[in-house]
Image (tube, rainbow, N blue to C red):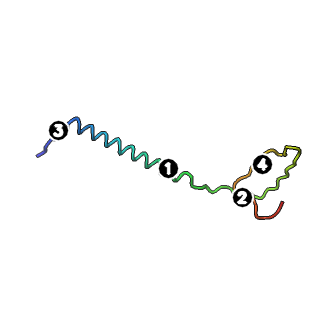
């Protein structure tokens, strides 16, 4: 024997609220996991040794900007 259940408007509304809360919670968890995984370091190019000549004039340097990649600097060598 199959029994049918009558659902009131209040019960239906409560079900929709719970469904929305679960969906919002799932999206929040997915975003938090994505934020935790995103900053993981990606293996880049091998650090290289580069020689840069900088000329100093009164209140100016040539080149004005030197761009380096992480790991390209060598502070421990004692070379100038």
- The reply to whether the C-beta atoms of the residues labelled 1 and 4 are less than 8 Å apart is no
- The reply to whether the C-beta atoms of the residues labelled 4 and 2 are less than 8 Å apart is no
Element marked by disc 4: loop
Packing grade of label 1 (10 A; few <14, some 14-19, many >=20) is few
Check disc 3 and report the residue beneath it.
Answer: 6
Q: Which mark is on residue 47?
A: 2
Check disc 1 and report the residue beneath it.
Answer: 34
Question: Which percent across, then down, holds residue 78?
Answer: 81, 64
Marked residue nearer the N-terminal end (2 or 3): 3
Question: Which percent across, then down, holds residue 73?
Answer: 74, 57
Packing grade of label 2 (10 A; few <14, some 14-19, many >=20) is few
Whole-number angstrom distance, CA of label 1 to CA of label 4: 34 Å
79 lies left or right of 27: right
Q: Residue at x 39, y 43 (%)?
A: 24
3 lies left or right of 20: left
Whole-number angstrom distance, CA of label 1 to CA of label 2: 29 Å
- The reply to whether the C-beta atoms of the residues labelled 2 and 3 are less than 8 Å apart is no
Marked residue nearer the N-terminal end (3 or 4): 3
Packing grade of label 3 (10 A; few <14, some 14-19, many >=20) is few
Furthest residue toward left? 1
66 lies left or right of 5: right
């Amino acid at each position: 024997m199959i029994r049918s259940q009558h659902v009131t408007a209040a019960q239906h509304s409560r079900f929709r609220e719970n469904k929305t809360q679960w969906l919002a919670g799932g999206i929040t968890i997915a975003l938090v996991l994505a934020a935790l995984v995103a900053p993981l370091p990606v293996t880049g190019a091998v650090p290289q040794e580069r020689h840069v000549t900088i000329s100093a004039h009164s209140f100016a340097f040539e080149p004005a900007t030197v761009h380096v990649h992480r790991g390209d600097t060598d502070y421990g060598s004692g070379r100038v």
